Amino acid sequence: MDAFFAAVEVLDNPSLAGRPVIVGGSGARGVVASCTYEARAYGVHSAMASVRARQLCPDAVFLDGHYRRYAQVSAELRDALRSFTPLVEPVGLDEAFLDVRGALRLFGSPREIGAAIRRRVRDELDLDCSVGAGRSKLIAKLASRAAKPRAHAQGKLPGEGVVVVALEEEMSFLHPKSVGQLWGVGPATAKRLTDLGVRTVGDLACLPEAVLVRALGKVHGRHLAALARGEDADPVVPDRPTKSVGHEETFREDIADRKILHRHALRMAESVAGHLRANGRTGRTITVKVKLSDFSVITRSHTVETGLDTGSAIGAVVAALLDTAELPSGVRLLGVSISGLQRASAGQQLSFVLDAPVAGALAGGAADAESRQEHWREVTAAIDAIRRRYGAAAVGTASMVGPDGIVVPARRDAPWGPSQEDLESRGTSR
């Protein structure tokens, strides 16, 4: 999708058309999630700090965003795409891969299918998208980027809309690209490749695979060598199972008080647990992520024997993990996630055993962890029933109580950092 979040905002408020619109956290610690091409003409882009975006484009209209609205439009997008093939693999809210090999006789060539997709999305959603086609996900992804519009001082310059890369054109299309456009090449990997004299995918393809393996490790080195040859065997997987559930928040101000951090961590544990129960899942590996004021990141993880799905049990592990982390400065961001997901079994007796360091951090609380898990299972079932009947804010734990009453942790409407109006010290979630 083209500038998806910003485009939805303009769709819902036509008075914003033609203006530089930025969706993201408008506060000092916010980041840009999406922006119109009018804002991009000033150099604004996604993931940029909002403070920098304001400097580049002082006249921009900042919107904190409406995540639920974007999710609604995203669901409509998936329905439109599935009218071409059932093999649709969503990527986030605004992107998807389609395997159309079985649809060629019905809908025509890849270029014709791409054009038909654009028409349907325009007709049904009143939004624009760009389509790339190739024999692999990698080529299709890069082709979709090449098909996109371009930002210009006088407004948006239309792109090709659909770009198809034939097999015999792959190397000439792929090799001039910056190596940073390949999956798995982040800042650290890019630095290592630059040290090896690699700047383009073509440079990477000329490098002996053994050199890459020595520099990056066997798995990563071989993977990038294959991508440089245009080899990407990853298939389109509809309904790819979720690997983890997480909730993280950037605070308006750094927090050094561990009691306050524990309260936020428990809220996040409740958020994660609620999402698990709503989807009939449990999880085994709990991870705490802490970003300090100097932007250094600390992570702690612990895997339990059987799946957890109550806030009390997950919160006990989270609190223990948080206590094992040394925090030499204030905490800028705190996150809780759970992985190792599995289907919840009816009547499953959940228990977990903590290792010595974690048990010690619980200061005696580990001994009754199993009984607390079972007791809270009954309480949690009652809470879920009350919320289904009377709403999410009808009941909650003490950690959810704030100046405005009960605030149930959930995916927030502005998950890109605190807004200027956000007076609470919690900001971004995923």
Image: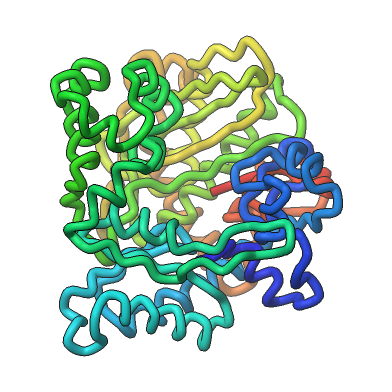
Q: Residue at x 36, y 59 (%)?
A: 143
Q: Is residue 213 above or below residue 49?
A: above
Q: Residue at x 24, y 80 (%)?
A: 109
- Residue 317 in view in this figure: no
Query: Quick check: 19 left or right of 36?
Result: right
Image quadrant assignment for residue 224: top left
Q: Is residue 130 above or below residue 120?
A: above
Q: How many numbered marks does the figure carry?
A: 0
Q: Is residue 361 above or below residue 389?
A: above
Whole-percent x and y of residue 172?
Answer: 27, 49
Query: Quick check: 16 left or right of 358?
Result: right
Q: Residue at x 58, y 62 (%)?
A: 3
Please tell me which residue lies in front, 362 or 205: 205
Query: Quick check: 414 left or right of 113?
Result: right
Whole-percent x and y of residue 409?
Answer: 61, 51
Q: Is residue 111 above or below residue 315?
A: below
Image quadrant assignment for residue 131: bottom left
Whole-percent x and y of residue 229?
Answer: 19, 42
Q: Residue at x 33, y 85 (%)?
A: 83
Query: Quick check: 410 left or right of 421?
Result: left
- Residue 113 in view in this figure: yes
Please tell me which residue lies in front, 348 or 202: 202
Q: How is the image coloured?
A: rainbow
Please tell me which residue lies in front, 258 or 94: 94
Image quadrant assignment for residue 150: bottom right
Please tell me which residue lies in front, 305 or 66: 66
Whole-percent x and y of residue 366?
Answer: 41, 25
